[in-house]
Amino acid sequence: MKKRVFRSMSLLAILAIVVTTLAISILIYREFYQSMEDEVRSEAAYLAAGVEGQGVDYLNRIQQQYGDTRLTWIAADGNVLFDSAAEEERLDNHLERPEVQQALRNGTGQEARLSSTMGQQNFYYAVRLADGTVLRVAKTVESVFGMMVSGIPYLAGIVLCAVLLSLILARRQTQRIIEPLNDLDLENPLEEESYEELAPLLHRISKQKHSIEEGMQALQDQKKEFQDITDHMKEGLLVLDNQGSVISMNASASQIFQVAGEDAVHHNVLRVSRNEILQQAVEKALGGENGEGLMALRGRIYQVLTTPIWTEGSLKGGTLLLLDVTERQEAEQQRREFSANVSHELKTPLQSISGYAELLKNGMVSPGDIPRFSEKIYKEASRLMTLVQDIINLSQLDEGGGGAEKQPVELLALAQEISSRFQEIAEQKQVQLAVSGKPGTISGNRRILEEMISNLCDNAVKYNRPGGRVEIAVRPEKRSVLLSVTDTGIGIPEESQSRVFERFYRVDKSRSKETGGTGLGLSIVKHGAQYHQANLQLASELGKGTRITVRFPRGAHAAVDSAASAPPPFPGASPTS
């Protein structure tokens, strides 16, 4: 309000100053213009006498004395005999000029217009001489503006002083107006003796204050009533009236719905959430029945339980209880998915073994084909054993690593040891396998680390191409040790990069079947990284290769330095976490 009053007073004062200044400027301009006209008439009369006595010689002699005045001598037929600003031969006939016509008729004539020759706004005054010729004197309007400009600094100074003085006075006056308002005692508004115009407002403030005090007392009573019950509840609790408005809401419910209690109390439950499951449960409670349902909200799953509240046979409202069952539901979902995936994965090799064995049992295989069928049974059994072992490894990781204690493990030596195991397979695939880097020791579970590196090497060799390369690199850093496995194989499509660490997920199922993959290798790597509190990164591009990087903390329980940069990906790849 203070700013608005000050702004209004200042604008009015400045507007008055500006209007006054413009009015004075216009009056001064008119005065200067009138003075210029009088001066031109006087000069014309004086010059006419000289021209009549001495002719053009007189004009040639005095034109230097009238540098800011244009002199033109015009014959009775309109031809220019003399002009102080232009060559006579280049000027057109002046007979039709208004001031010339007036002078020929009346003896004198005047006109203000834009000069077609000089391109300036001029004031013309013409006098008819005794011989019938016309002498015209002209001055530019710019000369009037020149006189005005010379006075502008003084005028601007006066205006500036007036504006500053107005602002100071406006500020003081504003302070005097606002000061009584700032000194109002809102605790006792009716005792104030300020402006009469404020009396209705003060009465309304007094009534509102009384209403707020009553409301606050009611809220405090409700808070005290439910405090002992709701303060230490982890479950979300809402109490509704029979119209569906929130009477009470504990802190857990506020956190679940991310709604402040004061924004929800005394408002319909729709303001808290519009979830369909929640609304159905509330409708049952307000209809006199118990309600129940599962509600998904911001990545969490809650069990909703609603109960109607009856008092003396009348429905007064309902209670709504929220139980966080996210972990239970996720565990149940994972168990179902894992059971289904395991059943499917075990079924395939078992069917193959059963089919080949049945053919051998019934003598439906020729003696020459028995070794081939036996080899197929052996491969399927090996695949089955690998799958079972991977499932056991994952189960141990889910249980915290099988209870084995962590110990110092030197990653470069471990990588070289595992690399030697894959040399023969790599040579068969025509893939070059190399280990590089510097020794780096971490605190970890050696068996889990072996499984991680083995799975990374196995994938890098299996999914490579003839003539390709696999490089295992170990690079110690200040707070961590970085292990990376890079291949030049087929790569992973971008849409699959976020899912390759899921259990039983295969990018190319047909190729995985040919290579004997179980779909659990990268899942073991992921769980092993989580067990060691390591950061796992994937960079891959289809047709160019893949790099998987694991950054292990140096200490047994050190936090991962996630801000540190991963090694640069192979050319053309884009990293995906």
Image (cartoon, helix red, strand yellow):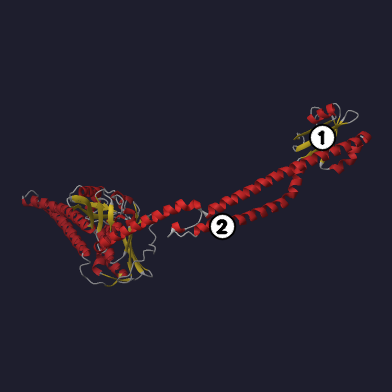
Residue sitting nearer the eye, 369 or 259: 259
For label 2, the residue is 176
Crowding around mark 2 (Cα neighbors within 10 Å: few <14, some 14 to 19, many 20+) is: few
Horizontal placement of 76 versus 435: left or right? right
Q: Position of residue 475 (x, y in %)?
A: 36, 67
The three-letter amino acid code for the residue at tag 1 is Tyr
* CA distance separating discs 1 and 2: 60 Å
Asked where in the image residue 564 lies, by quadrant, the reply is bottom left
Image vertical order of residue 270 relative to residue 137, above or below: below
Q: Where is residue 2 in the image (x, y as percent from the top left)?
A: 53, 55
Q: How many marks?
A: 2
Residue 252 seen in render:
yes
User: In the orientation shown, which residue stands out farthest toward the left?
Assistant: 362
Q: Position of residue 233 (x, y in %)?
A: 24, 62
Crowding around mark 1 (Cα neighbors within 10 Å: few <14, some 14 to 19, many 20+) is: many
Horizontal placement of 561 versus 422: left or right? right
Label 1: which secondary element:
strand
Asked where in the image residue 76 lies, by quadrant, the reply is top right
For label 1, the residue is 125
| Label annotation for residue 464 | none
Residue sitting nearer the eye, 211 or 258: 211
Horizontal placement of 47 versus 188: left or right? right
